[in-house]
Amino acid sequence: MRTATASICTIGDEILIGQITDTNSAHISRALNSLGIKVTRMTSIGDDHADIINSLTEELNRNDIVIVTGGLGPTKDDITKKALADLSGSSSYKTDERQLEIIHRILSARGLDVLDINLAQASVPETCDVIPNRLGTAPIMVFRFPEDRFGHPATLYSLPGVPFEALGALDDIMHDIRQHYYTADIYHKTVMTFGIAESALSKMLDEWEDSLPADMHLAYLPNPLTGVRLRLSIYGGSRSDEEERIGKEMVRLKDILGDALYSEEDDTLERSIGRKLAEAGKTVSAAESCTGGLISSLFTSIPGSSEYYLGSVTSYANSVKTGVLGVPSEIIEANGAVSGECVAAMAEGVRRLTGSDYSVATSGIAGPGGGSETKPVGLVWIGISSQMGTETHRLVFKGDRKRNIERFASNALNLLRLKIEKEINN
Amino acid sequence: MRTATASICTIGDEILIGQITDTNSAHISRALNSLGIKVTRMTSIGDDHADIINSLTEELNRNDIVIVTGGLGPTKDDITKKALADLSGSSSYKTDERQLEIIHRILSARGLDVLDINLAQASVPETCDVIPNRLGTAPIMVFRFPEDRFGHPATLYSLPGVPFEALGALDDIMHDIRQHYYTADIYHKTVMTFGIAESALSKMLDEWEDSLPADMHLAYLPNPLTGVRLRLSIYGGSRSDEEERIGKEMVRLKDILGDALYSEEDDTLERSIGRKLAEAGKTVSAAESCTGGLISSLFTSIPGSSEYYLGSVTSYANSVKTGVLGVPSEIIEANGAVSGECVAAMAEGVRRLTGSDYSVATSGIAGPGGGSETKPVGLVWIGISSQMGTETHRLVFKGDRKRNIERFASNALNLLRLKIEKEINN
């Protein structure tokens, strides 16, 4: 029995004109993937009645399942519901009482009046099933098309575009899919590396990659914040020994990667560091200049990070470097704030100030302006300090401001990770 | 003469399985939009030869211009180039000497060996024109299809998937498009609001929206970090008085929005605050607990922010609140760290520590754990301090950790913005 295929479609002019980036599709895709349902295509179209009908018809012709997000807001520019009514041949609407109750509850909890346009959101084409949306005012609509319509039974799920609501509805939708379709597992194993460029990594892994069994596939996914993610996949797994087979390949892969590998799951540097610190009962703090709070923000994005993360000082002004972190002003006068001496003093200063076991400090030039011949845009000094000593590193990157800040932060985290691994394992 | 239409297509299994989010399409779309070229569709497909050929053929049938990103990496999972060779009927390859030189330069600057797989990237189907990619190793390929192939002259641009490289190539591609297609302006005017929910905003604007001329269209774009963005558009503008016509509507809109409007351009709270502070010669600092560095990170994402942003303390641990920010431990003992008393002391503490004119402080419970009946997950206290006094605000949100942190930070910035506007204008 074959597993179903799916297509994800986002509706909204704001996506087509580039005002917002679609993040829902990636989440929906991961959820479908975990049921063994292969996503064949993602499409974004505008708030246009004919485009919506045509595109959804094409996708329903090609796929068993189509998941639509967006265009369900209370405002006049949202027309998805009308298009779906027409697509499914519905000329009348029904009110979903469960959603009506949720609309009243949500708006009164926010202290807002219940407006007619809010109530209208509980009204849906009579051709659809409704899954109530507990997190927002627009319900999830499920249209089940019989086989004679598209040559196969097809289901269309319509979700709100607001990411929080769309993602909140995913469990219910996956439950519905499991009840109506045959599902199986696609097996993926992901490992995280940092510090080796994609092409060099590919060269290192060339021989091993060539020796992989025919049904295994390796993908390289570089990201400035997390490094190169390697994903080994077995699709359409009818065998039951995928885990064992991939495990065998992992042993060889780990041997080749050495300490460039920092995690054997889909992970981030900050989560991996956090786990290591928590296990060892150690703490960390940060002193940030050019990274401006990003390192701290990454640490605190992890639930439970208060167990090992004490805090940070963003010393953007030199007066904060000297006044708060206690960097001697002579160091800045003699070497500048972007120097090994300065980041060493910053790292030691914040460790003293917070009492943490480890600390990381950054000072660099993110650009676009502010560079010089000896200290170009893209230069960063990174300091890592612990009871065992303080080390400093000088790195240079070529990117725009955002990318430079990201590279500065991730490389600082990676150097911290290497020091922690060395000291905690010994 | 009609303006061209375009379609954007991203290629890569990593997008379809949801491992990465496509951010290129939004940037490409904005660039096309500014030339008056309407993007009709965005599509993501996998690294599959038949899918690539079929999808690109469909898009070339429907559009004048197709922009493809991804699948050009040096590794074996990238097959876009082969598919494009087949689509364009090319059986042989040529080497682009300019790109070859760039490959050598980039890799030697990074201290990397030049590998055969890197050199192979300069080899392209003989059917295409090449725009050298100065930021990466894979060149931009331009395929120009004659009218008899798709019923109209069509152009396909193939860009690398790495965002930094794709965006770096945009100027060259837009230049090429301007030389080959008729371009015109689509007129958009965007204003930023904060503090009013989308549906309430829609109710407020209902009457005005109904009175808009038929060729004007209003869109609502809510975002937890920036508030609700309102976009007023005139498409296909053949008239030359769009600016004046929209200007007239803006006067009415501003009157309705009052101080919920914080900027009359596509803006963010942190950029708007930065401009106001820089103009007044004032400075700001932050003391962050639950927002964990996000406020600082937002401030420092703006080039030139060192002019008004001095720095911050992320006081995640209570010991940092007392030891670094000088919050009296009696305050925390009596009220807890999530309290008006605590954020007031934090805000005053960081202002004293950094010598800034303004400061903003946050303490709350982002979740998922850590809440109680009186202090639920989603509760935040925000303190704003200046020479004129310190104010505190209590707000409650319902979201996951990430969304709560974002709402805490943006609401803190908005309260800071309101205080600055009040005090600086008086």
Image (cartoon, coloured by chain):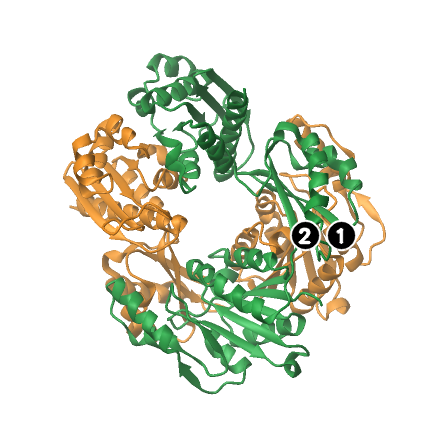
Chain colours: A orange, B green
Q: Residue B50 at x, y = what percent?
A: 55, 77
Q: Is the C terminus of chain B in the top left, top right, bottom left or bottom right quadrant? A: top right
Relative to residue B195, is residue A224 drawn left or right?
left
In this rendering, the answer to whether A247 lies above or below B319 is below
Q: Residue B221 at x, y = what percent?
A: 62, 43
In this rendering, the answer to whether A97 lies above or below A30 is above
- Report, in whole angstroms, how far the alpha carbon at label 2 lies from the one at label 1: 10 Å
Indicate the chain on which mark 1 is placed: A
In this rendering, the answer to whether B125 lies above or below A241 is below
At 38% across and 16% down in the image, what residue appears?
B332
Residue linked to disc 2: A158
At 49% across and 38% down in the image, what residue appears?
B271
Q: Is residue A19 visible?
A: yes
Of the pair A1 and A57, the residue shown nearer to us:
A57
Q: Is residue B367 visible?
A: no
Relative to residue A127, is residue A205 drawn left or right?
left
Indicate the chain on which mark 2 is placed: A
* Neighbours of disc 2 within 10 Å: few (<14), some (14-19), many (20+): many
Q: Which is in the foreground here, disc 2 or disc 1?
A: 2
Residue linked to disc 1: A128
Of the pair B4 and A387, the residue shown nearer to us:
B4
Q: Quadrant of residue B202?
A: top right
Mark 2 and mark 1 lie on one chain; the one further toward the N terminus is 1
Q: Residue A24 at x, y = what percent?
A: 56, 51
Q: Secondary structure at mark 2?
A: strand
Q: Is the N terminus of chain B in the top left, top right, bottom left or bottom right quadrant? A: bottom right
Labels 2 & 1 near each other (Cβ < 8 A):
yes
The type of residue carrying mark 1 is Cys
